[in-house]
Image (tube, rainbow, N blue to C red):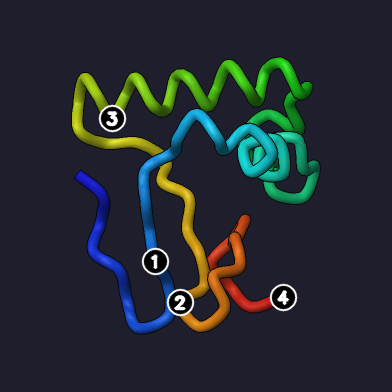
Amino acid sequence: MTPPSSARLIFRSWTDNDTALAEALWCDLEVTHYFGGAMTREQARDRLEIERERENRFGVQYWPMFLRETGEYRKRCCPD
């Protein structure tokens, strides 16, 4: 179940069309610094499938988030 949106952020489930978003997240050295480092594009695509399956099986995943005001995809929730 997708978490409720906040005044600032909107969450949604990953889709088959989110390959570019997944690569932007999991191939970024800054974002992945504390959990093993950047993935290859292939690894990011595999992770996308894992997250989709995790939601199907367990009802949770690492949901992508977007700024409510602009719809911009956010790789991190804190201001730049």
Q: In percent of the image, x 72 and y 16: which residue is there?
A: 42
- Where does label 4 land, which residue? 80
Mark 3 or mark 2: name the one nearer the start of the chain.
3
Q: Position of residue 8 (x, y in %)?
A: 42, 80
Tell me if 73 is positioned left or right of 56 in this view.
right
Q: Quadrant of the N terminus?
A: top left
Tell me if 1 is positioned left or right of 25 in this view.
left
Q: Position of residue 55 (x, y in %)?
A: 28, 30
Q: Amino acid at mark 4?
A: Asp
Tell me if 3 is positioned left or right of 65 in this view.
left
Label 4 to label 3: alpha-carbon separation: 29 Å
Q: Is residue 19 above or below residue 49?
A: below
Label 2 to label 4: alpha-carbon separation: 16 Å
- Where does label 2 land, which residue? 68
Q: Amino acid at mark 3?
A: Glu
Mark 4 or mark 3: name the one nearer the start of the chain.
3
